[in-house]
Image (tube, helix red, strand yellow):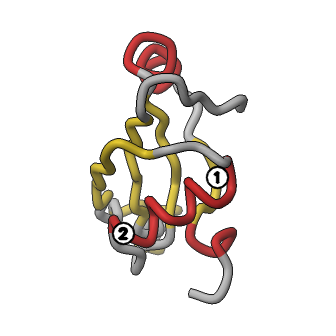
Amino acid sequence: MNNYRDIIKAPIITEKSAGLAQNNNTYTFSVDVNANKTQIKQAIEAIFNVKVANVNTVNVHPKKKRVGRYVGKTNKVKKAIVKLQEGSSIEL
């Protein structure tokens, strides 16, 4: 991974993630499937200039989808749930 922007793809904004952001100072991001927790922590700290307390990751496996007689799968995704230290926040 050459660039931190290659690791962090996009924030995930849902009702659940918005509630976590308001109440627990926790943010959810879509990240590269090959990134580990240390790389994710370094990327978040560099991009948003905040201090990260901990990082949890979730691998979302592909689902089978069908269009007519053709069967395929959705893309594999990795989510990172990042908790920030007290006093740090991210504007999304």
Given residues 74 and 66, the one toward you in this image is: 74
The residue at the point 56 percent across, 54 percent down is 45
Residue 3 percent coordinates (x, y): 67, 80
Residue 23 percent coordinates (x, y): 41, 11
- Image quadrant where residue 82 sits: top left
Q: Distance between the residues labelled 1 and 2?
A: 18 Å
Q: Which residue is labeled 2 in the image?
A: 38
For label 1, the crowd category at 10 Å Cα-Cα, with few meaning under 14, some 14 to 19 and many 20 or more, is few
As drawn, is 20 to the left or to the right of 31? left
Q: How many labels does the image show?
A: 2
As drawn, is 11 to the left or to the right of 15? right
Q: Nearer the viewer, mark 1 or mark 2?
A: 2
Residue 33 percent coordinates (x, y): 42, 73
The residue at the point 40 percent across, 80 percent down is 34
- Image quadrant where residue 1 sits: bottom right
Residue 17 percent coordinates (x, y): 46, 26
Residue type pointed to by label 1: Ala
Q: Give above or below for 28 relative to 69.
A: above
Any part of residue 73 in sight: no
Q: Which residue is labeled 1 in the image?
A: 10
Which part of the image, by quadrant, shows the C terminus? Answer: top right
Label at residue 32: none
Q: Give above or below for 17 relative to 3.
A: above
As drawn, is 74 to the left or to the right of 6? left
Secondary structure of residue under mark 1: strand
